[in-house]
Image (cartoon, grey):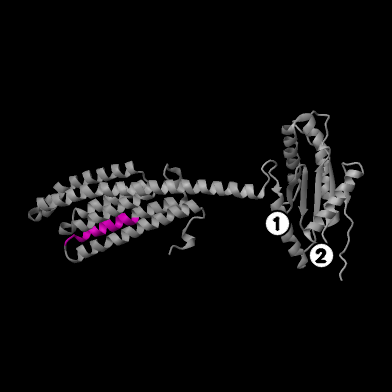
């Protein structure tokens, strides 16, 4: 288990560090056949000592690159290819002195190629495998010189040919896995985007970007239940654009849509992050103000009226003003959401009757308990 203190805070860097730890585990496993070879006198002690020293220095350098964030300066911040090249070079060095145990070392090269499936493409893996095969072939004369009379050309050719046949296959397989991973990541990203769009459509009005009626009523019911359990009160405001039908008739429905969008853009920046502003239907909007008194709601509506008076509607002539009539109702305990909205709607109706471009408050009536 990797300690959280040893990991960077960035999630991508954490992932790269975990993969580096996986490669570090491979070095630990690779020390097992070397230790057995040393114990049985197959490999000289200085080979393992030199291998261990290079492994420590190399991996410490990679660790510092990841830990200090210097890896981010490279095209591939995972440093997959440099790590693989370093590991391959060390395996080719140690297998040269492995004698009859050489086959055990060559297996490590296959594992290294699988490690490349995290980031490298099929072409990169295949190219690296061909270079590794060539490098292994170049070590055969050195192996012959070291082994002397023990060198069996036929056995070595069998090893080299087998290695040359399997390594490209492993590379292609690893590359295919890498391609599948990338396609899966792309598909997941598209799925997340689609889910976000679906969520947006399920909770927001497509035209104005405000919440839709269904979502706001759901939030209102949650707030009602919370208030009935002892929470602070809340207010509901219904805002209706005055003479909106004239806008559609005189300037067209596209101009009307632009007015609705602009109105929503004017209102929403004036609200708190806890407030809910929704398109209730047509040119009617509903504003839900949690934990708000009637006095606080009036101040909020006054800000909206002032901002609306200064708003510019690009689709309309400059002399045309857009105003709103507003009904405000404060919730009382055990009142239904439908009853609350009905009281706000009646207040809105009085605002329309009293000349429009104004706010009216709903009378506060407590329910009669029988």
**Residue carrying label 2:** 333
Residues shaded magenta: 42-56
Specify the quadrant that holds the C terminus.
bottom right
Q: How crowded is mark 2: few (under 14 residues within 10 Å), some or many (20 or more)?
A: some
Residue 193 vs 222, above or below: the answer is above
- Is residue 55 in the magenta section? yes
- Residue drawn where x is 70% and y is 42% of the image: 208
Q: Nearer the viewer, residue 108 or 283?
A: 283
Does residue 79 appear in this view?
Answer: no
Q: In which quarter of the image is the N terminus?
A: bottom left
Identify the image quadrant of residue 290. Answer: bottom right
Query: Which residue lies under the disc numbered 1?
Result: 218
Q: Position of residue 280 (x, y in %)?
A: 75, 47
Give left or right: position of 147 versus 122. left
Q: Main secondary structure of the magenta part?
A: helix
Q: What element carries label 2?
A: loop
């Amino acid at each position: 288990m990797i300690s959280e203190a040893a990991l960077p805070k960035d999630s991508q860097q954490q992932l790269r560090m975990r993969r580096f730890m996986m490669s570090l585990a491979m070095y630990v496993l690779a020390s097992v056949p070397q230790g057995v070879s040393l114990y049985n006198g197959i490999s000289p002690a200085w080979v393992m000592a030199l291998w261990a020293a290079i492994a420590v220095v190399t991996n410490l350098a990679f660790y510092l690159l990841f830990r200090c964030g210097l890896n981010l300066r490279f095209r591939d911040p995972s440093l997959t290819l440099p790590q693989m090249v370093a590991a391959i070079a060390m395996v080719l060095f140690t297998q040269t002195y492995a004698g009859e145990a050489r086959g055990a070392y060559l297996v490590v090269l296959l594992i290294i190629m699988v490690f490349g499936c995290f980031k490298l493409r099929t072409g990169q893996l295949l190219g690296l495998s061909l270079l590794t095969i060539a490098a292994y072939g170049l070590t055969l004369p050195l192996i012959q010189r070291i082994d002397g009379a023990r060198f069996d050309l036929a056995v070595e050719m069998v090893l080299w040919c087998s290695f040359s046949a399997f390594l490209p296959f492993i590379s292609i397989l690893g590359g295919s896995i890498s391609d599948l991973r990338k396609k899966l990541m792309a598909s997941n990203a598209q799925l997340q985007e689609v889910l976000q769009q679906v969520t947006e459509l399920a909770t927001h009005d497509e035209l104005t970007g405000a919440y839709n009626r269904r979502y706001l009523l759901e939030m209102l019911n949650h707030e009602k239940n919370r208030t009935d359990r002892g929470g602070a009160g809340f207010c509901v405001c219904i805002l209706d654009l005055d003479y909106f039908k004239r806008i559609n008739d005189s300037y067209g429905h596209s101009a009307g849509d632009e007015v609705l969008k602009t109105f929503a853009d004017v209102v929403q920046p004036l609200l708190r992050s806890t407030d809910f502003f929704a398109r209730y239907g047509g040119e009617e909007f509903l504003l839900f103000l949690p934990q708000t008194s009637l006095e606080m709601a009036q101040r909020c509506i006054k800000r909206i009226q002032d901002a609306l008076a200064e708003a510019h509607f690009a689709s309309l002539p400059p002399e045309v003003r857009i105003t709103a009539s507003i009904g405000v109702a404060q919730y009382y305990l055990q009142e239904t959401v439908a009853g609350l909205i009905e009281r706000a709607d009646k207040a809105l109706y009085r605002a329309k009757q009293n000349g429009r471009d104004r706010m009216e408050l709903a009378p506060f009536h407590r329910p009669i308990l029988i």
